Image: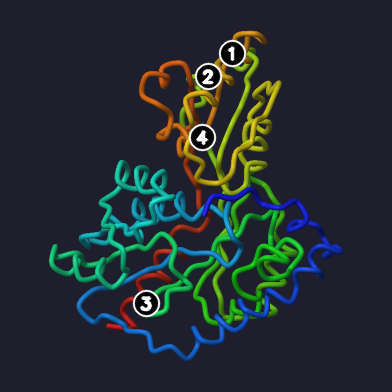
């Protein structure tokens, strides 16, 4: 599903359009109720983590999944990442495959079967909190600090897949920011009021390859991600001089003519072109040398606390 996030989703209060669409949210509510009663299976032969969201898009699930893969390698376990195969999410699959040990399939239960066959001890799912058939040993929800829960309504009136009260059933929350010193006290307090037992981990974005760029250059940026404003904000916070921003729908498959127009614009304005690593993998091969991308890393605060939580949860359930 390729889409551009409606601006009204992130208004502090629901607007007329949100209320107009509200009756459709009842279908989402019904689906979520069915998820509660649908029998889910846990797998005794393998340990599972799910990194998902209840805010649709742009919460940092994939970078968080990759960070967990990196952090948990020290546990002396054979670890894999996993993603249900969606044709429109090829970009995320490519990144996960490039940076981790990825298993994909059309069904998450099949992924677990494949992982068991390969002798995997722990599998980290990128997305899947709304899965009907599989239960996980550890369940994390990702939020972007700036967007938080938007207007607080369910889709399509707002950005939420589930009501915020669903945090009662999850083990941990990752709060992602584009800056290191973001004050998450207010959001953390709201989360704890819903679930006092849930663990909260602050994280922030670092540009790993920033030394590759001359910050005195002008940059035209483009992206097709869930929350394009985060990309621009990260660059601005790192002193990139951005002259123009072009936004495409999430998971957009770039056409040759679209990239050609961006190249022409950059030539006209004497600017460099910059995109996300997730978008770069979809650029036609013959044009890749004309475009740069930022490689990001997610720094998670209190890593020891995070690892101890995971160790405790997976030992409780096996």
Q: Earlier in the sequence, mark 4 or mark 3?
A: 3
* Residue where numbered disc 2 is placed: 260
Callout 1–callout 2 Cβ contact below 8 Å? yes
* Residue where numbered disc 3 is placed: 137
Disc marking residue 314:
none
**Residue mark closest to the camera, 3 vs 2:** 2
Is 69 or 281 nearer to us in this picture? Answer: 281
Q: Earlier in the sequence, mark 1 or mark 4?
A: 1
Left or right: 196, with 62 as reference point: right
Is 140 or 222 nearer to us in this picture? Answer: 222
Q: Earlier in the sequence, mark 4 or mark 2?
A: 2
- Per the image, label 3 sits on a secondary structure element best described as loop
Calculate the distance from the C-alpha at mark 3 to the C-alpha at mark 2: 47 Å
Q: Where, quadrant-wise, is the C terminus in this rendering?
A: bottom left
**Residue mark closest to the camera, 4 vs 3:** 4
Left or right: 10, with 129 as reference point: right
Disc marking residue 276:
4
* Residue where numbered disc 1 is placed: 264
Calculate the distance from the C-alpha at mark 1 to the C-alpha at mark 2: 6 Å
Callout 3–callout 2 Cβ contact below 8 Å? no
- Per the image, label 2 sits on a secondary structure element best described as helix
Calculate the distance from the C-alpha at mark 4 to the C-alpha at mark 2: 17 Å
Calculate the distance from the C-alpha at mark 4 to the C-alpha at mark 3: 32 Å
Residue 281 spot, x, y in % from top left: 40, 34
Callout 1–callout 3 Cβ contact below 8 Å? no
The number of numbered badges drawn on the structure is: 4
Residue 8 spot, x, y in % from top left: 78, 56
Q: Residue at x 67, y 25 (%)?
A: 239
């Amino acid at each position: 599903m390729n889409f551009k996030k409606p601006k009204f989703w992130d208004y502090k209060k629901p607007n007329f359009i949100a209320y107009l669409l509200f009756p459709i949210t009842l279908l989402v509510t019904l689906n979520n109720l069915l998820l509660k009663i649908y029998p889910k299976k846990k797998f005794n032969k393998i340990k599972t983590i799910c990194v998902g969201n209840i805010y649709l898009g742009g919460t940092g699930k994939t970078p968080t999944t990759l960070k967990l893969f990196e952090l948990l390698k020290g546990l002396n376990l054979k670890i894999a990442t996993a993603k249900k195969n969606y044709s429109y999410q090829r970009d995320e699959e490519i990144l996960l495959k490039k940076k981790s040990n990825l298993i994909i399939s059309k069904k998450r239960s099949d992924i677990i079967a494949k992982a068991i066959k390969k002798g995997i001890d722990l599998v980290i799912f990128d997305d899947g909190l709304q899965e009907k058939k599989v239960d996980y040993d550890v369940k994390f929800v990702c939020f972007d600090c700036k967007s938080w829960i938007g207007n607080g309504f369910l889709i399509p009136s707002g950005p939420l897949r589930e009501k915020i009260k669903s945090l009662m059933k999850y083990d941990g929350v990752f709060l992602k920011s584009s800056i290191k010193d973001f004050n998450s006290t207010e959001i953390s307090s709201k989360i704890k009021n819903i679930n006092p037992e849930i663990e909260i981990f602050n994280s922030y974005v670092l540009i790993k390859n920033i030394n590759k760029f001359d910050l005195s250059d002008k940059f035209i940026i483009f992206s097709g991600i869930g929350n394009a404003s985060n990309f621009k904000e990260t660059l601005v916070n790192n002193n990139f001089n951005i002259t123009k921003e072009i936004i495409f729908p999430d998971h957009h498959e770039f056409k040759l003519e679209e990239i050609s127009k961006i190249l022409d614009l950059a030539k006209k304005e004497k600017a460099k072109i910059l995109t996300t690593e997730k978008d770069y993998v979809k650029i036609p091969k013959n044009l890749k040398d004309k475009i740069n991308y930022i490689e990001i890393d997610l720094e998670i605060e209190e890593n020891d606390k995070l690892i101890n939580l995971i160790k405790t949860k997976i030992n409780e359930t096996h």
